Image (cartoon, coloured by chain):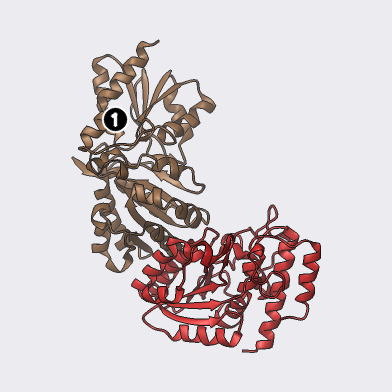
Chain colours: A red, B brown
Amino acid sequence: MQKEVLQKHACNIRRNIIQMVYDAQSGHPGGSLGAVDILTYLYFEEMDVDKSNVASLERDRFVLSKGHTSPALYAVLYEAGLLQEDLSTFRQINSKLQGHPNMNYVAGVDMSTGSLGQGISTAVGMALANRLDQSSHRVYVLVGDGESEEGLVWEAMMAAGHYQLDNLCVIFDVNHLQIDGKIEDVLNPMPLDKKAEAFQFHVICCDGHDFDDLQRAFDEAGKTKGKPTAIIANTIKGKGVSFMENNYAWHGSAPNEEQYLQAMEELKEGI
Amino acid sequence: MAQETRNAYGEELARLIQKDSNIVVLDADLTKSTKTIEAKKACEERHFNAGIAECNMMGMAAGLAASGKTVFASSFAIFAAGRAFEIIRNSICYPKLNVKVCATHAGLSVGEDGASHQSVEDVAIMRSIPNMQVYVPCDQYETKAIIRHVAKEKGPCYVRLGRGKAEDVYREDTDFKIGRVNVLTEGKDVCLFAMGLMVQEALQAKELLKKEEIDAEVVNVSCIKPIDEQGIIDSVKGHKLAFALEEHSVIGGLYSAVAEVLIKTTGTRLLPIGVNDTFGESGKAKDVLEKYGLTAEHIVSAVKEELLKK
């Protein structure tokens, strides 16, 4: 793992996220920025996806259950050379880059998501299919901590635990914020680690912005047999743009020109 | 002969799962009621119980289908089309995945369980989702033909099945044209479009009406979406009066689907016989259907009343 290379990718991805949301004057920058390092690690280090296999099922797959952070997914696919679309069409009419991702428009999007709770449920089905096909490919799914308030998340966790899907890795993106405020104030789903354990998962906690720690977590997940893994990744919503960090107001709003310029300035040198 | 359409589903699915290694079956703790247990007996490794968690069952079905599987997912209609509606919409129909939602225990004929379990809205709900096809077979042979048909179709399908025994309308060797309306008997005075168990009631009503010298045409509409527009237009040709008969709410089901066709093209007056925007109740299926006006006798009196108005 070359950390500097990953950091450079992550910085480019963050710049593209800001650019997309600014161009569209619509979208979800906070959660997108917070998930960048996890996605960067997945697409550049962990998953066996590249240009040659992106259109096939014969590879690891990733489900963005928190589908509103699609800018992060599009930007990471773009950075990895897996997406040729013009990112500036995001959320515009006739674009393949829908506000929430559509798997039939973009080869690298492995599931249409956006309605919270459903992505993890579909990922359980994918993992089950891999087992039926005796495929060694793994399924990764990113779930928001706010999203875990959806009951469907726990139906899916129950099924994954019951069927001992050790080819499934659920990553909880824990930034403690949701649209209406702090998740502990809105409806507290914590402790996620103990809940996941109770649902028969192997649980690993890590820093969702530290590539060494992400490597440790994903390596351990890959070696875990007989049960699915839940990685509880602590992240900072809005990571990389000072005025967006830890501010739930940036969940779903676009920067104005001044804010855009400041954000791009801050992201110039990488973080 | 009479047979539950859900039994026919179980038998056909058991046959298909052995023939096609791509088929996976999901159920939500109702395997003995929905009859997917027959598929489980035939191929246990490709039958999964999602437990009492219909939403997750539909999500898993989507994931399996996104991995190339042909998935049959079953529960009662109230839970499949009702509770899991939005997962079917967003995770199955929006990405146009190959999932067959085969829902049993639809309509008032659930009987004793009462209104909480009597889905009278499922066809309306499922029909409104883009990419979804909707089928309502009337007997065992049509059920088997429709199950074979949807197994071959690419994309989401909803099949509405019943709990109680349904008298045979067709024969084992019937050559079905699934997707087209089927004129069971012609008649010049009134055209009766029927789906599901109302097909048998319509056929009975035809015989009763004969005694009154009223000649009724009976048309089985088993594919509600995509609806056979030309078949419906052809059936009403020469008829001033038509009825849509359904064990379903008069809002959004067969009546609406047929009306949507006729209003564009013909001047035929179309009236509903269905569940009149109300919940059902407990009782023997026969008693409930009778109370809510879903019988041959009720059809006869409604037809006579309308024809007398002229």
The answer to whether residue B154 of the structure is visible from this angle is no
| Residue A70: image location, x then y, percent | 62, 65
Horizontal arrangement in the rendering, residue A41 relative to residue A91 (left or right)? left
In this rendering, position of residue B276 left or right of residue A46: left
Residue sitting at the far front: A185
Q: Is residue B227 visible?
A: yes
Quadrant including the N terminus of chain B:
top left
Quadrant in the rendering for residue B160: top left
User: Vertically, is A12 above or below B219?
Assistant: below
Residue at 55% of width from left, 79% of height from top? A47
From the viewer's perspective, is residue B204 above or below residue B163? above
Asked which secondary structure carries label 1, the reply is loop
Which sits in the foreground, A165 or B218?
A: A165
In-front residue for pair A222/B232: A222
Q: Is residue B9 above or below residue B242?
A: below
Q: Residue B110 appears in which quarter of the rendering?
A: top left
At label 1, counting other C-alpha atoms closer than 10 Å, the crowd grade (few under 14, some 14-19, many 20 or more) is some
Q: Which residue is mark 1?
A: B292
Q: Position of residue B218 (x, y in %)?
A: 33, 28
Residue B96 locus on image (x, y percent): 50, 55
Q: Determine the chain carrying the residue at label 1.
A: B
Please determine whether, in this image, residue B121 is positioned above or below residue A227.
above
* Residue at the image point whose x is 29% and y is 30% from the top: B292
Which amino acid type is shown beneath numbered disc 1? Tyr
Q: Quadrant of the C terminus of chain B?
A: top left
**Most distant residue in the left direction:** B1
Query: Residue at 21% of width from left, 44% of height from top?
Result: B3
Could you tell me how many numbered marks the image carries? 1
Give the image quarter of residue B71.
bottom left
Find residue B291 and report its horizontal and vertical position in percent.
26, 29
